Image: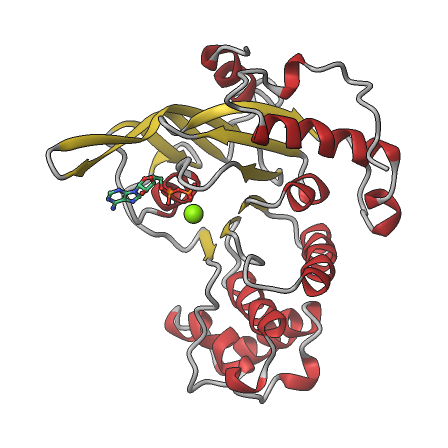
Amino acid sequence: MTSPEGARMDAAGGTAAGDRPRISVQEVSKVFQVGAEDFVALDRVSLDIADNEFVTVVGPSGCGKSTMMNILAGLEEPTSGAALVNGQAVHGPGPERGVIFQQYALFPWLTVRQNVEFGLRTAGMGKKERRERAEHFIHLVQLDRFADALPKMLSGGMKQRCAIARAYAVDPSILLMDEPFGALDALTRVKLQEQLLETWSAEQRTVMFITHDVDEAVFLANRVIVMAARPGRIFDVIDVDLPYPRHEDVRLSPEFGALRNRVWHSVYHQDAGTSASAMPSTTTARQ
Ligand code: ADP
Ligand code: MG
């Protein structure tokens, strides 16, 4: 079994020497009081994420994925350890961090355009600039034809694209996404994954994307962090050395299949205690 210490060391890597990581989770523990009991949701989790890196976090339900993201979003405080963004400890939400949840958090009474402009308006941006900026991001997520539609007229996938455009519009350097495609059907999901990568390529951001879908984790990421539960911890870290842009051909490639198998093994055989790092790199591709 890969020792937790070993995994932590791996997880802290991934940044060029001397570069300050954009995100640094340092020995973060989170203990919830459940009745008279202490419940350890996160146990000394350490993770560095480099500027413009796309990291996915995958793991069984209850392993602390959302807790970690909420700490980075500034919605929860760690019990011990520190979460740093740009070298500063996080103690609340901030404009440099855009957060996207599974449930589309759009204002139902505002149109797509007004939703996308909302954060810009509250930031005091002038009407013309706001409008142009919103147009740009609405176009990027291909919602031009629906700019004046209310959320109730949009499909789930379109609502989520609108939420992505809104998060991008305020120009956060970091996107924290908690199972954003979890409620969508498989086909929409695959399309949105490709679109998210296109957007990420055009407008570089540091992304932490949580999912429990192994294919999604591998398809999107530079690096996949596998977590385990009881206590919530980093179990494994897998580099995804596949070229971008990624489309269907990548998904069907033997290299993708091998990586997917490694991550799958790590997620679903945690009780066996063997992390994917212990597997040979020439794992047979999925057929
Ligand atoms: P995941 O997102 O990986 O499914 P979570 O981070 O939501 O997991 O939760 C991790 C564990 O912490 C779960 O067992 C959950 O029940 C527990 N937990 C989360 N938030 C609280 C809370 N506010 N109070 C008590 N337990 C919590
Ligand atoms: Mg969760």
Q: Position of residue 172 (x, y in %)?
A: 50, 54
| Numbered-mark total | 0
Q: Residue at x 64, y 85 (%)?
A: 146
Residue 79 shown left or right of residue 47 in the figure: left
- Report whether 223 appears left or right of 234: right
Tell me if residue 172 can be seen. Answer: yes
Residue at far left of view: 36
Q: Quadrant of residue 14?
A: top right
- Left or right relative to 242: residue 271: left
Quadrant where the N terminus is found in the figure: top right
Q: How is the image coloured?
A: secondary structure
Compared to residue 89, the image places residue 204 above or below, namely below
Res 72 → quadrant: top left
Q: Nearer the viewer, residue 86 or 208?
A: 208
Which residue ends up furthest to the front in the rendered image? 272
Along the viewing direction, whichever of 189 and 132 lies nearer the viewer: 189
Position of the C terminus by quadrant: top right
Give percent across and percent down for residue 134.
58, 74
Locate residue 47, reporting x and y percent: 48, 27
Residue at 57% x, 31% y is 267
Q: Is residue 38 above or below residue 4?
A: below
Q: Is residue 49 visible?
A: no
Q: Quadrant of ligand 1?
A: top left
Closer to the camera in the image, 193 or 24: 193
| Residue at x 85% of width, y 51% of height | 248
- Residue 57: % across, % down: 54, 38
Determine whether 269 is above or below 62 in the image: above
